Amino acid sequence: MRRWIVVEWNQASGQPRVVDMGELYWTEGEAESVAADERQRTAAVGRRERYTVHIVDLDVTS
């Protein structure tokens, strides 16, 4: 099963942080939309964090 997460890369330290406490999104488009919203929100206050979307493969064979 495939899901997506959004990762924030801090402008100062470059350290990653999973956005929204690690919420898993059902589609890549949904995650991309969240990332775009976060980019816009931080740019509006003069920040330059980067937001990237990553695949999470869940093993559900149990």
Image (cartoon, rainbow, N blue to C red):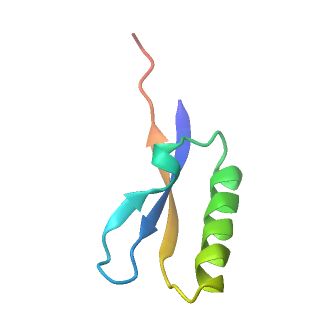
Residue situated in front as seen by the camera: 34 or 21: 21
Residue situated in front as seen by the camera: 49 or 33: 49
User: Quick check: 40 above or below 60?
Assistant: below
Residue 18: x and y in percent read: 43, 54
Task: Name the residue rendered at 35%, 65% in the picture.
Answer: 16
Task: Name the residue rendered at 65%, 59% in the picture.
Answer: 34
User: Quick check: 27 above or below 54?
Assistant: above
Residue 14: x and y in percent read: 32, 77
Q: Quadrant of the C terminus?
A: top left
Looking at the image, residue 17 sits to the left or right of residue 25; the answer is left
- Furthest toward the bottom, the residue is 46
Residue 50: x and y in percent read: 49, 76
Number of dots carrying numbers: 0
Task: Name the residue rendered at 67%, 44% in the picture.
Answer: 27
User: Quick check: 17 above or below 22?
Assistant: below
Looking at the image, residue 2 sits to the left or right of residue 58; the answer is right
Image quarter of residue 13: bottom left
Residue 30: x and y in percent read: 69, 51
- Furthest toward the top, the residue is 62
Task: Name the residue rendered at 48%, 78% in the picture.
Answer: 49
Residue situated in front as seen by the camera: 37 or 56: 37
